[in-house]
Image: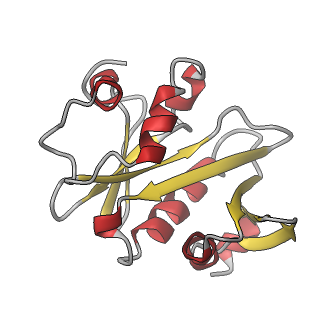
Amino acid sequence: MSSSPSPTHPDLTTARLILRAWTDGEAAAVLNGTRQAHWAADFPAEGDSVIVGLFAEHPAWLGEYGHRQVIERESGLVVGSIGLFWPPGDGTLELGYGIVASRRGRGYAPEATRAMTAHALTAPGVHTVFANVELSNPPSIRVLEKAGFQRWSTEERTARFGATMPDLSQR
């Protein structure tokens, strides 16, 4: 991938956000700590750095149904990231997301989650998107609930939430 967005991975646009594929240059900047003018002051968060560090090991995460930057349309700044852990297993894809602290509480995470989930469900053979969340993280649980995900199971410290096309179309 070049330093500009790939025409084969079009942006996903919502009312307030753009979900844009990572470029090699942006990923390298995260890894080497080079600040970019189009990043919010508190981007990247720790989770963003961890995920970007795994791109070389998982090149499919940079494909059409992979990871994207979350861009605030009003400011043009990158305020988080969201991604699908490709390839699917038995028709299911795991979703992960994070919004920087300075932009939390604005509904960006559920908005991005809905868009990325709808996009994921257009992938051949994919019928379900799920996310695992720690029970000690109620804001993330609320994100998934607001995005239309249903709690499927709860274990000792985590809950699994999932969404299928029928779940989302009933919203």
At 15% from the left and 60% from the top, the residue drawn is: 75
Compared to 96, does 65 lie above or below? above
The image quadrant that residue 163 belongs to is bottom right
Compared to 9, does 48 lie above or below? below
The residue closer to the viewer here, 92 or 45, is 45
At 85% from the left and 69% from the top, the residue drawn is: 154
Q: What is the quadrant of the C terminus in the image?
A: bottom right
Residue 78 image offset from top left, x and y in percent:
27, 50
Q: Can I make out residue 146 in this image?
A: yes
Say left or right for 64 vs 80. Answer: right
The residue closer to the viewer here, 28 or 148, is 28
Q: Can I make out residue 16 in this image?
A: no
Residue 125 image offset from top left, x and y in percent:
77, 40
Residue 22 image offset from top left, x and y in percent:
37, 33
The image quadrant that residue 128 belongs to is bottom right
At 61% from the left and 70% from the top, the residue drawn is: 137
